[in-house]
Image (cartoon, grey):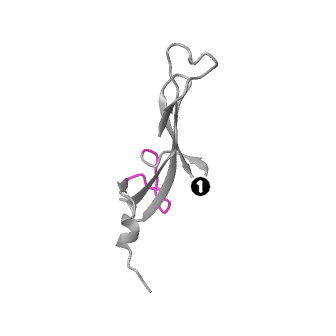
Amino acid sequence: MTRREPCGLGGSCGKGVVMFRVEPVHEAYSFVCLRCGHAWEGSYEIRHSVDDKGRLRADYYEKSLKVPSPLTANKCPTCLGRRIRILRPGRVQSARPQFD
């Protein structure tokens, strides 16, 4: 949900910039390392903001800790390889055999 909120008492941020406050978005991804075959899943909270130069930015958080974007700066936790395939969420769990 995006809400337009003016900054400052006068309702302007200066130089015609309008600030937006955006609610965090929750995303999950499945990853597969193309080097060693290891697969894992991750769930992230994405917080959008505008930096001091007026550029839109997205910050990723995992368990309340800020982390690099898993879409651009990911590496395999097993072999540290950087050739990662990103899949929709649930793909890793659905591929694993279920044992009772």
Q: 10 Å neighbourhood of mark 1: few (<14), some, or many (≥20)?
A: few
Residue 93 position, x and y percent, is 40, 69
Is 85 positioned to the left or the right of 5 in the image?
Answer: left
Q: Residue at x 50, y 22 (%)?
A: 18
Above or below, 41 against 52 in this view is below
Residue 59 position, x and y percent, is 52, 41
User: Is 40 or 43 nearer to us in this picture?
Assistant: 43
Residue 94 position, x and y percent, is 36, 71
Is 30 positioned to the left or the right of 7 in the image?
Answer: left
What secondary structure is found at the residue carrying circle 1?
loop
Which residue range is magenta in the image? 72-84
- The secondary structure that dominates the magenta segment is loop
Q: Is residue 8 magenta?
A: no
User: Is 38 or 79 nearer to us in this picture?
Assistant: 38
The residue pinned by badge 1 equals 63
Farthest residue, direction right: 9
Inspect the image, locate mark 1, and give the three-letter code of the amino acid beneath it: Lys
Q: Residue at x 49, y 63 (%)?
A: 78
Above or below, 89 against 72 in this view is below
Above or below, 90 against 20 in this view is below
User: Is 72 or 20 nearer to us in this picture?
Assistant: 20
Q: Residue at x 50, y 33 (%)?
A: 3
Q: Quadrant of the C terminus?
A: bottom left
